[in-house]
Amino acid sequence: MDIISIDLPWKETKQGARALALADKEGKIKIASAADDDELLRIVRDNAQPSSLVLLDVPIAGTENLGKGKYQRPVDMALLRQGIWVLPSRQARARGRELQARLNKELRGITIQEIYPYAVYKFLAYLRQKKLLSHLKQDKLSILLDDGFRAYRPPKYKREQRREKLLANMKFLYSLLTDPDLGLRFSPPLPRPDDSLSRGGLSELGDEYDACLGAIAGIHYASGSPYAHLAGEANSGSILLLADRWLAARLNNERGTGARGS
């Protein structure tokens, strides 16, 4: 596949909770799951091509510079200033770097990039609220966001304690991922959240949805969309996300990064 997006725990010893979205540049997505890192690497090895883009939802570069009261990398701080909440990257320690090394050792020619599904989710949800989701198909980077983006909080599908609210928020995310304006094609169909799922089942589904959100950024990047944006810098940490001209300009001012195609 062209894009392999992986949602994974920040501790290698944690069992389960590894979801993969295998996608091509045309927007076809298939979901897989792995019980541990060994199975994860096997799935990647079986599906990757020499030119594949492998996306990891874990801090990769820059965590070695954290410690002694320093919890966030420059790219994390840049996102926080734009209203995109992030966990302290210090918690990941060397997890991302070590997994990147294992992938590079087994698979030559692939590109490995850090992603952050929540940033993609907030961007897409805000665009849909503004009825601007279809504008992502444009070949030219436009201004789609505004100052309201910083304060906007999309429905929370992780760490929501009330099960009824969690289910409703998961349904919101499902409707976003399957919105025709995104043009995604899930084969088999994307699992739908319903009352039959336990809290654990909903959590696993949330991991799969996170992998799909990462895949959306990867699809835009691989297809040369101007809305694919690398925030941050390679040495101190960079994250692939989606950004319009408004958000890209503010992230550029923070760290001197650039949007692909601009």
Image (cartoon, helix red, strand yellow):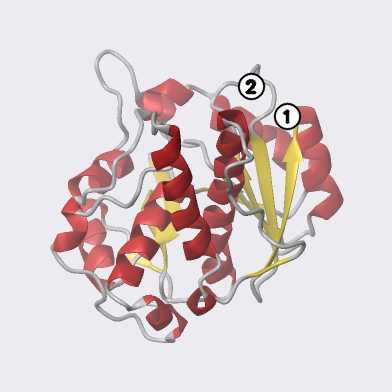
Q: Residue at x 54, y 26 (%)?
A: 10
Residue that carries the numbered disc 1 in the rendered image: 37
Tell me the residue that label 2 is attached to. 12
Q: Does residue 237 appear in the picture of this structure?
A: yes
Looking at the picture, does residue 172 appear above or below residue 102? below
Please rate how many residues cluster around mark 1, counting C-alpha atoms within 10 Å: few if below 14, some from 14 to 19, many from 20. some
- Any part of residue 116 in sight: no
Q: Is residue 214 left or right of residue 29?
A: left
Please state the horizontal and vertical placement of residue 68, each as a whole percent of the image. 27, 13
Query: Which quadrant does the C terminus fall into?
Result: bottom left
- Where disc 2 sits, the SS reads loop
Inspect the image, locate mark 2, and give the three-letter code of the amino acid beneath it. Answer: Glu
Q: Amino acid at mark 1?
A: Asp
Q: Is residue 73 left or right of residue 35?
A: left
Q: Quadrant of residue 243?
A: bottom left
Distance from the alpha carbon under mark 2 to that under mark 1 = 7 Å
Q: Earlier in the sequence, mark 2 or mark 1?
A: 2
Q: Nearer the viewer, residue 43 or 104?
A: 43
- Do callouts 2 and 1 mark residues in contact (Cβ within 8 Å)? yes
Judging from the image, what secondary structure is the residue with disc 1 in?
helix
Q: Nearer the viewer, residue 215 or 249?
A: 215
Give the residue furthest to the right. 46
Q: Image point 17% across, 68% down: which residue?
A: 146
Q: Position of residue 247 (x, y in %)?
A: 25, 64
Determine whether 201 is above or below 28 in the image. above
